[in-house]
């Protein structure tokens, strides 16, 4: 009897509660609007007001909002339109198996820079790109993507190379544990980046390029168009990191360069950047080079008569195979000799990482303004193995605030 009384009481309480809830729901509109607008704000990619140098020449139309009843968050394009971009592209040399290392780099570049500009991206490979590579990368890049197969003659031993001699060198370098010293493909890569990436037909469509490698990081927002900056400042070569080269990989590169210069008078620019690469007026090479895994440059530098002749000369000498000449010292020597110093630029404000070095903006104000995530102490710029202090000296520039603490 007592138990059934409790049951009746429990039923009465639950029923009352149910009736109350149904009544509240029928008399009150649940308001989702604050959630929706917050969600829209968070997902909207349009933050053109944070892009001070983009001149938005649009019609002044307001950003399109979703109809009130549509609660799907709106993702608008971040590309300020219409915007007159420079004639430029990203370029990545990669293998199919590099895909997921490159994907990280693409996301960094898109998030920190390109989603607001939509520049193209050219992918180059000595083997055909597979469908997965194309699907994943084209989905991430905000501009157009192009996938090009490198012709065999740009990725093979020229007929004047003595194969036995080249094989012997690789064996010696393997024993000496010189990094990539025994690799054939690394040598093809260095030769290709020196003499052929800019000769690919697709590159004829562009004036400037930005080279991107797998596994790099961009530490800071890039709040202006670096390509337009190159154009407006008449810059031909931009870098973020510079350092000394392992001399074992380039023992005769400078001797060969000197011979080339003797045989080709008049190729060196009048107000050149030669002091960056030599400390004794050209007698010896100090091995300083711009780290070419990051490069923003004008393709005309490589298309010039001087560089074409220089590359052909080096190629005939065979050092890409008889030694292990890298594209970084080759590009750097050429840029330092064939350009005026005003045409070479150090992007101190572009936070960049390629294992194992970082370029972290020296000045704290810059790091805060550009939302950098790098550790200032890791900045390689002022370390003893960096060549970048020479840049400041040659250009007679004041070092940024904070450099002493980072040296
Ligand atoms: N298609 C193709 N690309 C290559 C090959 N070897 C290297 N690459 C690409 O060439 C660029 C330079 O190669 P890396 O292996 O990064 O050379 P590195 O920067 O000197 O050395 P890491 O410290 O390994 O990064 C990268 O973009 C690679 O994806 C190859 O055999 N085929
Ligand atoms: Mg690399």
Image (cartoon, rainbow, N blue to C red):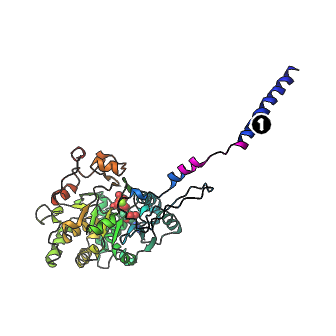
Q: Is residue 326 visible?
A: no
Quarter the N terminus occupies? top right
Name the residue located 16 percent from the left edge and 78 percent from the top edge: 264
Residue 251 image point, x, y percent? 21, 64
Bounds of the magenta segment: 26-38
In depth, the one of 401 and 83 nearer the eye is: 83
Read off the residue under disc 1.
19
Name the residue located 28 percent from the left edge and 75 percent from the top edge: 300
**Count the marks: how many?**
1
Asked if residue 72 lies left or right of residue 11, the reply is: left
Residue 367 image point, x, y percent? 32, 49
Label 1 crowd bin: few (<14), some (14–19), many (20+), radius 10 Å: few
* Residue 208 to residue 98: above or below: below
Residue 183 image point, x, y percent? 35, 64
Assign ligand 1 to one image quadrant: bottom left
Q: Is residue 371 visible?
A: yes
In depth, the one of 17 and 128 nearer the eye is: 17
Task: Choose top left, top right, bottom left or bottom right for residue 271.
Answer: bottom left
Label 1 element class? helix
Asked if residue 53 lies left or right of residue 38, the reply is: left
Asked if residue 139 lies left or right of residue 14, the reply is: left
């Amino acid at each position: 009897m007592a138990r059934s009384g409790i049951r009746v009481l429990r039923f009465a309480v639950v029923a009352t509660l149910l009736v109350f809830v149904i009544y509240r729901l029928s008399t009150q509109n649940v308001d989702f609007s604050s959630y929706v607008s917050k969600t829209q704000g968070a997902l909207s990619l349009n933050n053109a007001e944070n892009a001070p140098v983009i001149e938005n020449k649009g019609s002044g139309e307001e950003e399109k909002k979703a109809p009130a009843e549509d609660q799907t968050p709106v993702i608008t394009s971040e590309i300020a339109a219409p915007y007159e971009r420079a004639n430029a592209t990203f370029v990545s040399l990669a293998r199919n198996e590099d895909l997921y290392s490159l994907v990280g780099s693409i996301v960094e570049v898109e998030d920190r820079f390109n989603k607001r500009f939509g520049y193209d991206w050219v992918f180059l490979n000595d083997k055909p790109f597979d469908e997965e590579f194309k699907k994943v990368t084209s989905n991430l890049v905000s501009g157009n993507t192009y996938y090009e197969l490198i012709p065999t003659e740009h990725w093979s031993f020229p007929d004047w190379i003595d194969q036995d001699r080249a094989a012997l060198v690789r064996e010696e370098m393997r024993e000496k544990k010189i990094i990539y010293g025994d690799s054939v493909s690394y040598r093809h890569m260095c030769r290709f980046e020196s003499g052929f990436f800019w000769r690919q037909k697709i590159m004829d469509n562009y004036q400037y390029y930005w080279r991107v490698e797998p596994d790099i990081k961009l530490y800071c927002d890039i709040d202006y168009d670096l390509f337009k900056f190159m154009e407006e400042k008449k810059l031909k070569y931009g870098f973020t990191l510079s350092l000394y080269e392992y001399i074992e990989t380039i023992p005769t590169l400078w001797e060969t360069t000197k011979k080339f210069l003797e045989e080709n008078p008049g190729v060196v620019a009048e107000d050149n950047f030669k002091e960056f690469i030599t400390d004794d007026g050209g007698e010896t090479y100090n091995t300083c080079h711009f780290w070419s895994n990051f490069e923003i440059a004008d393709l005309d530098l490589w298309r010039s008569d001087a560089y074409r002749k220089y590359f052909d000369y080096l190629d005939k000498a065979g050092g890409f195979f008889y030694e292990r000449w890298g594209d970084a010292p080759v590009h750097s020597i050429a840029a330092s000799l064939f350009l005026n110093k005003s045409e070479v630029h150090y992007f101190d404000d572009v936070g960049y990482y390629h294992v194992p070095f970082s370029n972290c903006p020296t000045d704290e104000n810059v790091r805060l303004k550009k939302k950098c995530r790098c550790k200032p102490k890791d900045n390689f710029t002022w370390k003893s193995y960096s060549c970048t202090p020479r840049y400041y000296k040659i250009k007679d520039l004041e070092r940024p605030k904070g450099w002493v603490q980072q040296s």
